[in-house]
Image: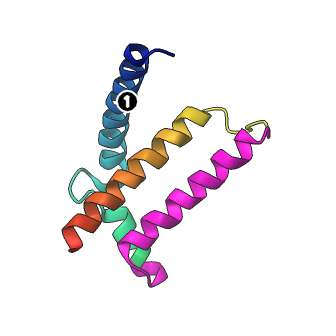
């Protein structure tokens, strides 16, 4: 793959992430606190918001690992790409959350 094609694909994924982020924020938080779900999960489990996000990312990464090892997905409405994008979004959330903590 040449660098121009790579850059176009990378930028398209970032744009896709933005759309997914906005839609999920609306559905999960009512569009107010972007960390609401993770903050609530952390409180429930007795861990920080960051660890709650990390737990979700590990769940997604485990799914990705299983699928990349050849297991056929039974969830038809979530592709490997969807899972990878979710991991990318969660990692950005962790980074933003962390920067706000220090």
Q: Is residue 5 above or below residue 31?
A: above
On the image, the x and y values in percent for residue 101 come to 22, 73
| Displayed quadrant of residue 3 | top left
Q: How is the image coloured?
A: rainbow
The residue at 55%/42% (across/down) is 83
Examine the rendered structure and indicate whether residue 43 appears above or below residue 24. below
Question: Which residue is drawn at the image coordinates 57% and 52% (left, top)?
Answer: 60
**Quadrant of the image containing the C terminus:** bottom left
Q: Residue at x 39, y 66 (%)?
A: 38
Magenta span covers which residues? 43-71
Q: How many marks?
A: 1
Residue at the spot 37% in from the left edge and 18% down from the top edge: 8
70 magenta-colored: yes
Image location of residue 54, percent across then percent down: 47, 65
In this view, 39 is above or below 77: below
Asked if residue 30 lies in the magenta stretch, the reply is no
Image side of residue 88 versus residue 79, left or right: left
Q: Which residue is mark 1?
A: 16
Mark 1, residues whose alpha carbon is within 10 Å: few (<14), some, or many (≥20)? few
**Is residue 16 among the parts visible in the rendering?**
yes
Report x, y in % for residue 27. 36, 47
Along the viewing direction, whichever of 8 and 51 lies nearer the viewer? 8
**Main SS type for the magenta part?**
helix
| Image position of 40 with respect to 34: above or below | below
Q: In what element is the residue under mark 1?
A: helix
């Amino acid at each position: 793959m040449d660098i121009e094609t790579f850059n176009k694909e990378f930028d398209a994924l970032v744009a896709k992430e933005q759309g997914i982020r906005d839609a999920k924020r609306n559905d999960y938080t009512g569009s107010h606190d972007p960390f609401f779900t993770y903050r609530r999960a952390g409180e429930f489990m007795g861990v920080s918001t960051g660890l709650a996000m990390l737990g979700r990312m590990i769940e997604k990464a485990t799914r990705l690992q299983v699928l990349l090892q050849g297991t056929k997905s039974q969830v038809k409405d979530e592709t490997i790409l969807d899972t990878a994008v979710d991991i990318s979004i969660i990692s950005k959330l962790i980074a933003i959350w962390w920067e706000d903590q220090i």
